[in-house]
Image: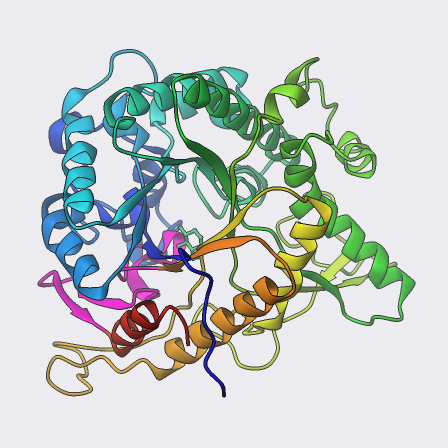
Amino acid sequence: MSALRFPENFVWGAATAAYQIEGAAHDDGRGPSIWDTFSRTPGKVHQGHTGDVACDHYHRYAEDVALMAELGLRAYRFSVAWPRIQPDGSGPVNPRGLDFYDRLTDALLARGIDPIVTLYHWDLPQTLSDRGGWTNRETAEHFADYALAVHARLGDRIRTWTTLNEPWCSAYLGYGNGVHAPGEQDPGAAFSAVHHLLLGHGLAARALRSAGAETVGITVNPADVRPADPASAADAAAVRLVDGLHNRIFLDPLTGAGYPDDVLEHVSRLVAPTFVRDGDEKTIAAPLDLLGVNFYAPTYVAGRTDGAGGGGAYPGTEGAVEFLPPAGPLTDMGWMIEPAALTRLLERIATDYPGVPLMITENGAAFPDKAGTEHPDGPGQVVDADRIAYLDGHLRAAHEAIARGVDLRGYLVWSLLDNFEWAEGYRKRFGIVHVDYLTQRRTPKSSARWYQEVISRNGL
Ligand code: IFM
């Protein structure tokens, strides 16, 4: 295959999230989050794994930043743990929590790595959850205060701020099917959470911009929703419904179009959307400098009229929509590998929501690679050809989107390190760097060395 070069100044980096790597769950005044509670609830997380220690990044950040520099990363996307900054989610700011991100930011900048901050990657302070979490409008207001507190400390050094990571997951998995914290199963709560997450984004984005933030954005995980049978009208209707509940419910209001009528009608069948107040849609439509896109796999659906569809995580689709079992080669998550879906998705976003620069803020794959004390591929080696193939395919797909005119600014691999994969615990490994959880030893996998080459060549 011929060489592919990415645009000059294309941002190459990696991403992680606080609860998944930091550990130090009780250090320096950190308060409890919904993931501390959820992971301690029997049956919720694989083998009762928790983020108490994780990759111990809180104590090993300097070593990890050195590794990033060795790999040539130009950017590093990390999230700030709200409960470190405000242990109860509101009120006094904990300076020792901010100190950690201050040290991390300085370490990154000293190595020429651009920090990209995510303010919320799912670790809601437990106290706020006890008051309703994202179903309570006050959480959105507290989120803006918290964003300002972080900006007040780091705003002199951090250029790129993203508010939420994947609000779809927070709302539908957290409050809809309950597979994520806080584990509620209530369709009305899921939609109320969607709205308050978006409102929190809008309030925080406005506050950050007034405080002088240079680049303000949000990260979503939009779906490339495809029909099982392209000729079927029922399947087309299922695509439209799932697209509405996954993509348009977020992207339309974020870009100023307000909630789509068909989506509001669907929501109204499950809950009266009284949580949407006058002026909210305007707040949510705060100008976006960057839209982060997290992508892993496409979604294939079929329309059912016999009430036999599973409905998946989408409230109100039970019986009417069947989510097809993933086909073809799968990752260790059981997710399909179809890079062309990424090109389609990026093109679609660029077409339907023009004018917003895009960045792939997560893309990667879990594979059960082994190292160290387990089954070494050789001394100090973790050979992960399957991950390289996945990343190579998706980078080619991203390049194709750029060639078709999409304004794609960068690519951040998920993830730098193997880490706590939420309900799956530590059994799923997404890292380009292997973590031995017994010793905390880091071993760059072959994919890390491959990625290092990609970055140095600015292409494939
Ligand atoms: O690990 C997660 C991450 O926290 C959010 N996006 C998807 C990843 C893989 O499931």
* 241 lies left or right of 164: right
* 259 lies left or right of 162: right
Tell which of 153 and 433 is nearer to you: 153
Type of colouring: rainbow
Tell which of 186 and 386 is nearer to you: 386
Quarter of the image where one finds residue 96: top left
Residue at 43% over, 72% down: 391
* Residue 369 visible in the shown view: yes
Residue at 18% over, 32% down: 102
* Residue 306 visible in the shown view: no
Tell which of 101 and 53 is nearer to you: 101
- How many numbered dots are placed on residues in this image? 0
* 292 lies left or right of 347: left
Say whether residue 433 is magenta: yes
Residue at 28% over, 19% down: 152
Quarter of the image where one finds residue 192: top right
Tell which of 318 and 112 is nearer to you: 112
Does residue 292 lie above or below 446 as drawn?
above
Say whether residue 241 is magenta: no
* 376 lies left or right of 204: left
Viewport quadrant of the C terminus: bottom left
Question: Residue 435: percent from the left, percent from the top?
Answer: 19, 64
Question: Residue 190: percent from the left, percent from the top?
Answer: 60, 35
What are the residue bounds of the magenta stretch? 415-444
Q: On the rendering, which quadrant does ligand 1 occupy?
A: bottom left
Does residue 36 lie above or below 144 as drawn?
below
Question: Residue 24: percent from the left, percent from the top?
Answer: 15, 40
Does residue 180 lie above or below 305 as drawn?
above
Quarter of the image where one finds residue 40: top left
Question: Residue 223: percent from the left, percent from the top?
Answer: 63, 55
Residue at 11% over, 63% down: 438
